[in-house]
Image (cartoon, rainbow, N blue to C red):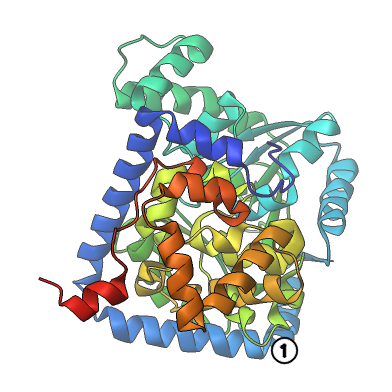
């Protein structure tokens, strides 16, 4: 699976996790812990009121996005930052490439950024001979492993401590029984030289305040602060949907995001960046470049229903609660954004045909909507993309024929009863081989034997 380009749903990746109980256990344990912490954190605030307020702010922002983007650009330029507009991945990478060429960049450090994963920044720079180092501990681990992140907040949650012990022993020379603290210390030591020698620092952007041109970054390790201040040039990739209207909005969003993500009242480090180092300042970058990225976002915004997905603050709460994600992990989704939110963003960003069958990777239990801090109606949007897939005839022909046959039978009681009688007493696995629409379903499950009596018969006789 490419680290830089979406590859669609990966059945092989889901089978790897299914067949590795230890990896599946690690994902389940991590997501349950995240969700338990979120639940506790939300009991300490009026979560319903906060969520409704945040929904309103983001919806207002998105319905006036052109105005706020112009304001943000004006303020950023006034603060001394360079602003680049990127409609596509290629334009975003071209802006980065121009900075790299102008400054002769040989090495770069990068804070955690899902947008940089979406754009394929690492592969782009490495192809140009630039040494790139991830500095978030989880991202650092999976970079050494040559894997993409599996979670929006915890990129390495699918890996156990024992996996990390083996990796660090091989790459950093730590003891095979090293404690987690010792492993973190070894990574810190290795990264220190990277920070000191890097020509370029890169980051994403949790929020960008239009009113003041303030870029806000949330973290727990301090690596983003070093990545954005130690190198002489800082490039931040910011999705155009990440804006907030006013500085007064920011404090509540910082708190709501971290409570939803990890259960913390606020991140350990919050960096507010308004431009490059000024003449009277002793540290900070000489140049700050903000790349405002569209890459399918305005297309999604134009959709009368699906635009609400753009309220997402990338907290990962919907992944943590999702029973499907807990069983498959993030790699099975095939691109940067996984879980329920990835399944509704992918059709908008990539196109529905490219992203199928992600909208179907859900039980529609509704838990994701219950925990979303900005009240995105995720189940409704999953159904919207499913309807569109049917309308555009993107679902398999066998499935369309099968569903049409079922609809015909289900609306004719006599025919339905005859069909049910024919199926009873036959293992469902056999029926699945006879009916192509059930082939994949029964291929992953043991045979089920239908009830000898139909529900209608049981109802008529009286269920005891």
Residue at image position (65%, 90%) is 63
Q: Nearer the viewer, residue 225 or 37?
A: 37
Residue 35 in view (yes/no): yes
Residue 363 appears in view: no
Q: Is residue 140 placed above or below 91 in the rendered structure?
A: above
Q: Quadrant of the C terminus?
A: bottom left
Q: In the image, is 31 to the left or to the right of 246?
A: left
- Residue at (72% x, 43% y) in the render: 4
Q: Is residue 77 above or below residue 36?
A: below
Q: Nearer the viewer, residue 404 or 29?
A: 404
Q: Residue at x 78, y 32 (%)?
A: 126
In-image side of 325 versus 90 (left or right): left
In the picture, the quarter occupied by the N terminus is top right
Q: Position of residue 421 (x, y in %)?
A: 41, 64
Q: Position of residue 412 (x, y in %)?
A: 51, 83
Q: Residue at x 31, y 26 (%)?
A: 181
- All told, the count of numbered labels is 1
Q: Residues within 10 Å of mark 1 (few under 14, many from 20)?
A: few
Q: Nearer the viewer, residue 352 or 418?
A: 418
Answer above or below: position of 163 versus 293.
Answer: above
Relative to residue 410, is residue 143 depicted above or below? Answer: above
Element type at mark 1? helix
| Residue most extreme to the left | 464
Measuring from the top left, give residue 52's x and y in whole percent: 39, 86
Residue identifier under label 1: 67
């Amino acid at each position: 699976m490419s680290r830089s380009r979406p590859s669609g749903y990966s059945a092989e990746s889901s089978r790897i996790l299914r067949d590795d109980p230890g990896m599946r256990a690690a994902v389940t344990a991590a997501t349950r812990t995240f969700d338990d912490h979120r639940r506790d954190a939300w009991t300490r605030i009026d979560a319903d009121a906060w969520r409704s307020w945040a929904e309103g702010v983001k919806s207002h922002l998105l319905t006036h996005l052109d105005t706020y983007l112009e304001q943000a650009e004006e303020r950023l330029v006034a603060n001394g930052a360079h602003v680049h507009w990127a409609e596509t991945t290629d334009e975003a990478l071209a802006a980065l490439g121009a900075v790299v060429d102008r400054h002769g960049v040989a090495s770069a450090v990068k804070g955690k950024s899902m947008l940089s994963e979406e754009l394929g920044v690492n592969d782009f720079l490495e192809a140009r001979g630039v040494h790139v180092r991830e500095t978030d501990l989880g991202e650092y681990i999976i970079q050494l492993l040559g894997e993409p992140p599996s979670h929006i907040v915890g990129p390495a949650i699918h890996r156990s401590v024992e996996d990390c012990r083996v990796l660090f022993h091989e790459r950093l020379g730590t003891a095979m029984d090293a404690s987690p603290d010792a492993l973190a210390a070894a990574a810190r030591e290795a990264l220190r030289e990277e920070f000191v020698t890097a020509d370029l620092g890169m980051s994403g952007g949790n929020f960008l305040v239009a009113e003041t041109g303030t870029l806000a970054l949330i973290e727990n390790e301090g690596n983003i602060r070093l990545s954005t201040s130690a190198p002489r040039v800082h490039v931040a990739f910011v999705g155009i949907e990440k804006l907030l209207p006013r500085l007064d909005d920011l404090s509540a969003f910082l708190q709501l995001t971290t409570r939803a993500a990890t259960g913390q009242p606020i991140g350990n480090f919050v960096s507010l960046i308004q431009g490059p180092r000024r003449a009277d300042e002793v540290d900070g970058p000489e140049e700050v470049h903000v790349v405002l990225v569209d890459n399918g976002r305005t297309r999604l915004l134009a959709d009368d229903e699906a635009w609400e997905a753009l309220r997402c603050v990338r907290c990962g709460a919907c992944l943590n609660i999702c029973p499907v994600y807990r069983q498959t992990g993030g790699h099975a989704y095939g691109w940067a954004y996984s879980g329920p939110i990835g399944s509704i963003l992918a059709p908008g960003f990539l196109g529905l045909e490219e992203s199928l069958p992600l909208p179907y990777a859900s039980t529609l239990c509704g838990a994701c909507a219950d925990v979303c801090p900005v009240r995105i109606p995720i189940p409704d949007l999953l159904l919207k993309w499913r309807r569109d897939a049917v309308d555009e005839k993107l679902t398999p022909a066998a499935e369309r024929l099968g569903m049409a046959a079922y609809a015909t039978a289900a609306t004719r009681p006599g025919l339905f009863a005859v069909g049910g009688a024919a199926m009873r007493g036959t293992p469902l696995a056999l029926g699945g081989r006879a009916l192509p629409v059930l082939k994949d379903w029964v291929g992953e499950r043991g045979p089920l034997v239908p009830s000898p009596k139909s529900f209608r018969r049981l109802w008529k006789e009286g269920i005891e």
